[in-house]
Image (cartoon, coloured by chain):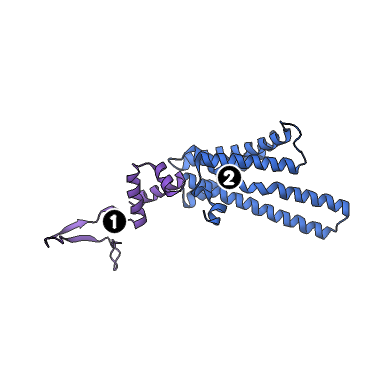
């Protein structure tokens, strides 16, 4: 697989339940990293921080997948459920880097208070972290779009418009979920 | 690849004469080119492989090393061209 294909459109090679399984593994890894970065080290077999992080991540993914599945079924014919679920799960992989950025920002703010670092340095570090976060988010959106496009076979404006609407609905539902449940 | 469109006005070409290399018999008439000839060599290869796979997209995906939806999208594009 070419590097650009792996980065932006691995769904040409991997889809369906295989992609779903890889996506689940990725989400577990993200939950593990997030839990570690939060300082909740694994002292008991049933680590509640890990379960909570995974549940938050999985419910956000599930909302996105269901919304895109509905959009795909409405806009295209012959859409397989496992293709949408799998490709959107796999599209989560850039989020592996997010906990590290959050941890870096938190660590820098803490060290600033401790070592009295100047405001300019702090602001530059924070801006750099925000820029990297935006890059990761953009990468995730590109992957989600390619996942949707490959799974549904839609092209052109039909694909773009239906993706934007589904993405907006999924984002709103995820925010509502976070406010009400988590 | 056999030309299918007129290089001057881009209209579809038609077959006027066929010839037997063995006995030199010539058959003249006005025949339409088969629709599969209009496709690119890659698309024609895809159709042949599709038939050899008994119409199984899953089998095609394994052979080509691509995902199922990608192979299905390729088939849909060929259907649109036809």
Q: Which chain is purple?
A: B
Could you tell me which chain the residue with mark 2 belongs to?
A: A
Q: Residue at 52% across / 40% down in the picture?
A: A18
Instruction: Indicate the position of residue A47 as horizontal and vertical percent values.
Output: 72, 33
Residue behind mark 1: B37
Q: Residue at 66% across / 43% down in the picture?
A: A30
Instruction: Indicate the position of residue A140 as horizontal and vertical percent values.
Output: 61, 49
Residue behind mark 2: A167
Helix, strand, or loop for circle 2?
helix
Drawn side of residue B25 relative to residue A32, left or right: left
Residue A32 appearing in the image = yes
Residue A182 appearing in the image = no
Drawn side of residue B12 relative to residue A119, left or right: left
Q: Residues within 10 Å of mark 1 (few under 14, many from 20)?
A: some
Q: Residue at 40% across / 45% down in the picture?
A: B60
Q: Colour of chain A?
A: blue
Q: Residue at 64% across / 39% down in the picture?
A: A28
């Amino acid at each position: 697989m070419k590097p650009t294909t792996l980065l932006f459109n691995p769904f040409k090679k991997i889809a369906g339940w295989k992609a779903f399984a890889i996506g689940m593994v990725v989400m577990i890894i993200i939950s593990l990293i997030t839990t570690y970065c939060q300082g909740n080290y694994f002292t008991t077999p049933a680590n509640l921080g890990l379960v909570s992080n995974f549940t938050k991540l999985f419910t956000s993914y599930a909302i996105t997948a269901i919304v895109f599945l509905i959009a795909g079924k409405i806009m295209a014919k012959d859409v397989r459920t496992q293709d949408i679920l799998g490709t959107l799960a796999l599209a989560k992989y850039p989020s592996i880097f997010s906990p590290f950025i959050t941890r870096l920002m938190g660590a820098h703010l803490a060290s600033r208070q401790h070592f009295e670092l100047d405001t300019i340095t702090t602001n530059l570090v924070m801006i750099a972290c925000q820029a990297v976060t935006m890059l990761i988010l953009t990468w995730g959106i590109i992957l989600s779009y390619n996942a949707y496009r490959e799974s549904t076979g839609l092209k052109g404006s039909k694909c773009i418009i239906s993706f934007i609407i589904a993405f907006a609905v999924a984002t709103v539902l995820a925010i509502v979920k976070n406010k009400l449940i988590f | 690849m056999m030309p299918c469109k007129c290089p001057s006005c881009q209209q579809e070409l038609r077959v006027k004469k066929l010839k037997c290399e063995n006995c030199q018999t010539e058959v003249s008439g006005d025949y339409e080119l088969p629709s599969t000839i209009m496709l690119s060599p890659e698309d024609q290869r895809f159709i042949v492989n599709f038939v050899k796979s008994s119409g199984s997209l899953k089998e095609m995906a394994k052979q080509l090393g691509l995902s199922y939806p990608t192979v299905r999208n390729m088939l849909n594009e060929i259907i649109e061209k036809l």
